[in-house]
């Protein structure tokens, strides 16, 4: 989409990003295929990035993407290692990725030359296709951002981050990630249509700002902080959510007015900055928090198995940072355990005092250590970590999972199959202990099915959504044995129906598409096609891997 | 779903006798008679039967009816039915289904809890991240009172009380 001409160049160019990434998808598809084939052959043991400024922030996103998706270590080498220190590099069997808008910075060129001559495979992601950096590459990936006039980079940063997303999607040959790639231009267009004014109002009086990110969001946080400094004259610093409480938060408490911290809450990560640390009083909870801060370094967060979820969140960060629906997060209730103190669930803490059923056995006198949405450990509670005392006699069990939920909380999924309906249903079922469910659409028309798929795809994998996919109960059922299912809609699936279902099936990372069919209305060929994708279950007596 | 008949066992019997399949059951004591549930549990390998609610809009509300395809569905006597008595979903929540597993089917608490978490996670192919309390799993947890009432939940580590 194109913005009006009276906007500053920066705003105009930012609004062109959607078109730019679309160009990149179309133009670079054969290049990324080539790259994937090369990686099959080369199998690099390490990845090295080389970039400065905004491009380096895009590379930081690429680093987490490659590390979480491919498990390869990624290091950024400062260009001065070659240009100033003239250190010889040992990069045999390494993948070297240089990222730049202009491709003309001398020290970037020196480092890239050094990498090439030490045996690395050199990929250059560059916007200016005539640049000397582009010519040093074994494989040149044009960013396709178009001409960038604004000094504050926008679309070149975003297209560089996007190039990493494409690179990893092809390298890993991951269908779900490729779906995200294809969907990104649409998300970027949506982002330009959002009203960002509420956030800007809060920033009007701000002089200092923390931008909090984590993992895949770290690069985006650094880029936002740079933009605040460069274009708003606001002193902004980027921090990892895992590290901001270990020191920097003291400054936020003393000198940062609450509204400023509120602004950073748009990414849902800095809730507790609203009160100065000294003013917090939640009984023992506050003490524990201090304790955690003191001991935090020794117990530095280890990356949990939340990697794939984080990857999805990071991919979405490309379209604006804030997570859709963060505002709808349930808050600790008065009857809950005291000293929860961590509305966003990021902080490391131990749940103790209840019997624990692990799914295998009952444990007494054990604690569950959780952080950043994942369980880190179970057993004897470690010292120096905030403790949440659960009510005596209570039983802590794995959250309930319900594969068949048509409604709840007064709403029926079929009536209005959208995200708001799913949230209402999830909230109602949560009060009955369900932590993950498949919203279930009973037999209905094609439009309702598509709306249901869109809504469930948007929520699956979104942190705290409680949505684990989608269950389509019909319309490929038996007319004779239909129960309350509406006969008009019951039918045999066409090949196009199966294509559409298979297309949806790839879009539930961390979740599943479940289709209930009646075998008398769905032939073996269709079942086999769906079954190969391992998402088809048969009848109300579900059958596995058809 | 066709009923089990002498010479036409249908999909229900197929599901019961094939060890590779899973059966999702609505343990309200109404959709399937407790005796048939017991038979299913005895027939299936452990871990292949799990609980679903088949819940409809009334869950979590005091409503006594709702509308499905333009028809009014009545909620009474623990059932959801059309005016002519056809079942239209269940008036059931998972803790109630678990309690039914204990009282109607005589299951142990641990096994009933697995049927509401571990087994559905395995059925959905999500058991690498969900259905257990173990390192590396999602912090999806449910806190129950000694009487198996839900006190609250954590979803991805985020707490919500069950209190209104």
Image (cartoon, rainbow, N blue to C red):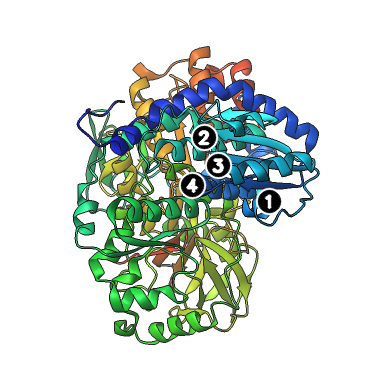
Q: Is residue A96 left or right of residue B113?
A: right
Q: Is residue B32 left or right of residue A116?
A: left
Give percent across and percent down for residue A301. Answer: 57, 68
State which quadrant residue B96 falls in: bottom left
Residue occupied by mark 2 = A514
Q: Secondary structure at mark 1?
A: helix
Q: Are marks 1 and 4 on the same chain?
A: yes
Q: Are marks 1 and 3 on the same chain?
A: yes
Can you say whether A174 is above or below A371 in the image?
above
Q: Estimate the spatial distance between the alpha carbons at disc 1 and disc 4, rounded to whole Å.
A: 31 Å
Which chain does the residue under circle 4 lie in? Answer: A
Q: Which one is nearer the viewer's eye here, A118 or A427?
A: A118
Which quarter of the rendering shows the C terminus of chain B? bottom left
State which quadrant residue A542 falls in: top right
Task: First in sequence, mark 2 or 1: give its number.
Answer: 1
**How many C-alpha atoms fall within 10 Å of the one at disc 4: few (<14), some, or many (≥20)?**
many
Can you say whether B69 is above or below A464 in the image?
above
Give percent across and percent down for residue A189. Answer: 34, 31
State which quadrant residue B131 falls in: bottom right
Q: Is residue A160 left or right of residue A199?
A: right
CB atoms at circles 1 and 4 under 8 Å apart?
Answer: no
Give percent across and percent down for residue A486. Answer: 34, 23
Q: Estimate the spatial distance between the alpha carbons at disc 2 and disc 1, rounded to whole Å.
A: 54 Å
């Amino acid at each position: 989409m194109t913005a009006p001409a009276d906007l500053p160049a920066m705003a105009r160019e930012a609004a062109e990003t959607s078109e730019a990434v679309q160009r990149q998808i179309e133009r670079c598809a054969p290049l990324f295929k080539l790259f994937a084939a090369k990686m099959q052959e080369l199998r690099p043991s390490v990845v090295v990035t080389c970039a400065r400024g905004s491009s380096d922030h895009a590379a930081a996103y690429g680093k987490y993407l490659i590390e979480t998706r491919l498990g390869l270590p990624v290091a950024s080498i400062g260009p001065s290692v070659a240009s100033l220190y003239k250190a010889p590099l040992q990069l045999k069997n390494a993948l070297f990725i240089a990222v730049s808008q202009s491709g003309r910075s001398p020290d970037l060129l020196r480092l890239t030359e050094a990498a090439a001559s030490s045996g690395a495979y050199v990929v250059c992601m560059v916007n200016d296709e005539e640049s000397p950096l582009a010519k040093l590459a074994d494989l040149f990936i044009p960013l396709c951002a178009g001409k960038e006039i604004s000094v504050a980079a926008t679309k070149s940063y975003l297209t560089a981050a996007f190039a990493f997303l494409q690179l990893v999607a092809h390298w890993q040959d991951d269908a779900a990630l490729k779906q995200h790639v294809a969907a990104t231009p649409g998300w970027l267009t949506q982002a330009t249509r959002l009203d960002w004014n509420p956030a800007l109002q809060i920033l009007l009086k701000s002089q200092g700002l923390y931008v909090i990110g984590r993992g895949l969001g770290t690069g985006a946080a650094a880029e936002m902080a740079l933009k605040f400094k460069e274009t708003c004259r606001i002193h902004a610093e980027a921090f990892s959510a895992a590290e901001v409480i270990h020191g920097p938060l003291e400054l936020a408490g003393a000198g940062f007015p609450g509204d400023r911290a509120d602004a950073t809450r748009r990414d849902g990560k800095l809730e507790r900055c609203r009160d100065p640390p000294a003013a917090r009083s939640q009984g023992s909870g506050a003490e524990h928090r201090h304790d955690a801060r003191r001991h935090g370094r020794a117990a530095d967060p280890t990356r949990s198995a939340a990697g794939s979820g984080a990857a999805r969140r990071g991919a979405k960060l490309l379209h604006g940072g804030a997570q859709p629906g963060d505002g709808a997060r349930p808050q600790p209730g008065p009857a809950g355990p005291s000293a929860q103190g961590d509305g966003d669930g990021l902080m490391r803490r131990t749940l103790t005092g209840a019997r624990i059923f692990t799914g295998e056995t009952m444990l007494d006198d054990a604690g569950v250590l959780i952080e950043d949405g994942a369980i880190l450990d179970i057993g004897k509670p470690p010292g120096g970590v905030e403790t949440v005392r659960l009510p005596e006699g209570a039983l802590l069990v794995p959250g309930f999972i319900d594969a068949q939920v048509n409604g709840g909380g007064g709403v029926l999924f079929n009536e209005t199959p959208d995200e708001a309906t799913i949230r209402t249903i999830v909230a109602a079922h949560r009060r009955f202990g369900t932590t993950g469910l498949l919203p279930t659409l009973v037999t209905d028309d094609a439009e309702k099915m598509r709306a249901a798929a869109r809504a469930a795809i948007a929520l699956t994998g979104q942190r705290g959504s409680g949505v684990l996919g989608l269950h389509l109960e019909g319309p490929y059922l038996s007319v004779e044995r239909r129960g309350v299912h509406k006969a008009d809609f019951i039918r045999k699936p066409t090949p196009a129906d199966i294509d559409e279902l298979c297309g949806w099936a790839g879009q539930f990372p961390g979740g599943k598409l479940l289709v209930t069919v009646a075998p008398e209305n769905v032939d073996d060929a269709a079942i086999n096609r769906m079954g190969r994708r391992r998402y088809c279950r048969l009848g109300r007596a579900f059958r596995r891997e058809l | 779903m066709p009923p089990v008949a002498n010479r036409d066992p249908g999909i229900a019997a197929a599901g019961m006798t094939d060890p590779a399949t899973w059966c999702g059951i609505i343990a309200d004591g109404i959709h399937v008679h407790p005796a048939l549930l017991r038979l299913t549990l005895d027939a299936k390998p452990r871990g292949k039967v799990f609980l679903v609610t088949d819940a409809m809009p009334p869950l979590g509300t005091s409503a006594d009816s709702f509308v499905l395809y333009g028809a009014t569905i009545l909620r009474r006597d623990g059932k959801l039915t059309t005016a002519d008595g056809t079942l239209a979903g269940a008036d059931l929540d998972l803790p109630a289904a678990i309690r039914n597993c204990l009282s109607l089917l005589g299951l142990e608490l641990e096994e009933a809890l697995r049927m509401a978490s571990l087994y559905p996670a395995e059925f959905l192919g999500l058991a690498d991240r969900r259905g257990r309390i173990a390192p590396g799993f999602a912090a999806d947890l449910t806190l129950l009172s000694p009487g198996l009432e839900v006190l609250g939940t954590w979803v991805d580590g985020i707490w919500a009380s069950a209190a209104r």
